């Protein structure tokens, strides 16, 4: 009898693929990490070990050895898909590539294997519509990096079998992820649409000369972000009026209606505005320092994730 719970295959050993491998292996799954590029596979385990060490330092992982023992590398897709119960595709963000890849996986994977995509922008119906096994396909869009940020957006097509969606949700929950359901296909899903709204307004405010890029970042990091790290916007406003969300709406909806009239224009993501934002970012770190700062970010995320889990268990 296998010591592993189930078998998952990760298709694509890039940044997101390696992170997904950690998610499944951490939960005791046997993981096959596939990539057609041998050079990518050559460094994959070493980079996964670095991520695992960060998690161990933050108290999110007892040891790295058991996690690494659950991950194997494979350069042949047919072999990688054999006996997989769940597949997480992490290929390029290119529609034609995804169409071809899902057609191949549909042909090679066993009939009851769930086939999910990590795409952040392409809806399921665009790359599964003409496939025989389209009922077992959906988007499972993570937040980068998924081994530290648990949200996963499950976005099925209209023909995706509801039982497959339920199965994907159960799997994500068993992995310690936080799945949400996108009830109708929509460009950008949920998270990126919320992020786009905030980023567009951030650029618009800098463009209009209302705030510097640095002070805009402080507004989120030391303001909105602190509350949003443990409760969502609806919970937040429910606590911001004596009689809850209806009271908040009565007090502030005219104010928000007035603001939205000034948010109807598309901000300029170029020219002087981009120069200003880029100058601010480069004052913080040079381009070659980005990998170091990314590792710092991951360490902070691991500490925050560990803290939130501990608070939840204590509460």
Image: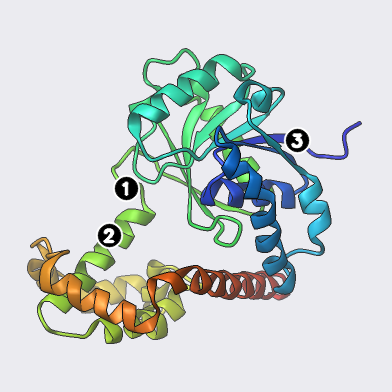
The colour scheme is rainbow
Query: Which comes sooner in the sequence, label 2 or label 3?
Result: 3
Q: Are marks 3 and 1 in contact (CB under 8 Å)?
A: no
Q: Which quadrant is the N terminus positioned in?
A: top right
The circle on residue 121 is: none
Q: Is residue 242 visible?
A: no
| Residue 312 rendering spot, x and y as whole percentages | 66, 70
Residue at horizontal 59%, vertical 52%?
19
Residue found at the very far right of the displayed protein: 1
| Residue 206 rendering spot, x and y as whole percentages | 17, 78
Q: Quadrant of residue 225?
A: bottom left
Q: Which residue is mark 2?
A: 196
Query: Which comes sooner in the sequence, label 3 or label 1?
Result: 3
Horizontally, residue 261 falls left or right of residue 166, namely left
| Residue 85 rendering spot, x and y as whole percentages | 67, 29
Q: Are marks 1 and 2 in contact (CB under 8 Å)?
A: yes
**238 lies above or below 209:** above
Query: Which comes sooner in the sequence, label 1 or label 2?
Result: 1
Q: Which quadrant is the C terminus positioned in?
A: bottom right
Residue at horizontal 33%, vertical 28%?
126
**309 lies above or below 206:** above
Calculate the distance from the C-alpha at mark 2 to the C-alpha at mark 3: 37 Å
Calculate the distance from the C-alpha at mark 3 to the C-alpha at mark 1: 31 Å
Horizontally, residue 96 falls left or right of residue 110, namely left
Q: Quadrant of residue 171?
A: top right
Q: Which residue is mark 1?
A: 188
Label 2 Cα crowd, 10 Å radius (few <14 / some 14-19 / many 20+): few
Residue at horizontal 8%, vertical 62%?
265
Calculate the distance from the C-alpha at mark 1 to the C-alpha at mark 2: 9 Å
Helix, strand or loop at label 2? It is helix
Quick one: 238 or 277, which is closer to the camera? 277
Q: Which residue is mark 3?
A: 6
């Amino acid at each position: 009898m296998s010591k592993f719970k189930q078998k998952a295959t990760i298709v694509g050993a890039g940044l997101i693929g390696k992170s997904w491998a950690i998610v499944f292996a951490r939960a005791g799954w046997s993981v096959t990490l596939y990539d057609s590029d041998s050079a990518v596979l050559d460094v994959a385990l070493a980079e996964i070990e670095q991520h695992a060490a960060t998690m161990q330092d933050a108290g999110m992982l007892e040891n790295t050895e058991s996690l690494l023992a659950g991950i194997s590398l494979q350069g042949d897709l047919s072999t990688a898909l054999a006996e997989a119960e769940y597949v997480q595709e992490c290929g390029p963000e290119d529609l034609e590539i995804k169409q071809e890849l899902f057609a191949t996986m549909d042909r090679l994977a066993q009939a009851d294997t769930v086939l999910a995509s990590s795409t952040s922008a392409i809806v399921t119906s665009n790359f599964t519509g003409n496939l025989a096994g389209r009922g077992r396909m959906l988007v499972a869009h993570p937040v980068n990096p998924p081994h530290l940020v648990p949200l996963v957006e499950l976005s099925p097509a209209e023909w995706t079998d509801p039982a497959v969606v339920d199965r994907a949700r159960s799997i994500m929950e068993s992995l310690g992820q936080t799945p949400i359901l996108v009830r109708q296909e929509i460009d950008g899903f949920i998270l990126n649409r919320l992020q786009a709204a905030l980023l567009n307004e951030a650029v618009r405010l800098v463009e209009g000369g209302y705030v510097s890029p640095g002070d805009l970042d402080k507004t989120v990091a030391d303001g909105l972000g602190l509350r949003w790290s443990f409760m969502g916007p609806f919970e937040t406003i429910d606590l911001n009026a004596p009689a809850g969300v209806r009271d908040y709406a009565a007090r502030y909806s005219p104010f928000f209606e007035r603001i939205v009239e000034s948010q109807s224009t598309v901000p300029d993501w170029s020219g002087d505005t981009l120069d200003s934002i880029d100058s601010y970012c480069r004052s913080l770190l040079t381009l070659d320092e980005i990998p170091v700062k990314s590792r710092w970010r991951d360490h902070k995320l691991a500490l925050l994730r560990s803290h939130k889990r501990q608070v939840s268990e204590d509460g």
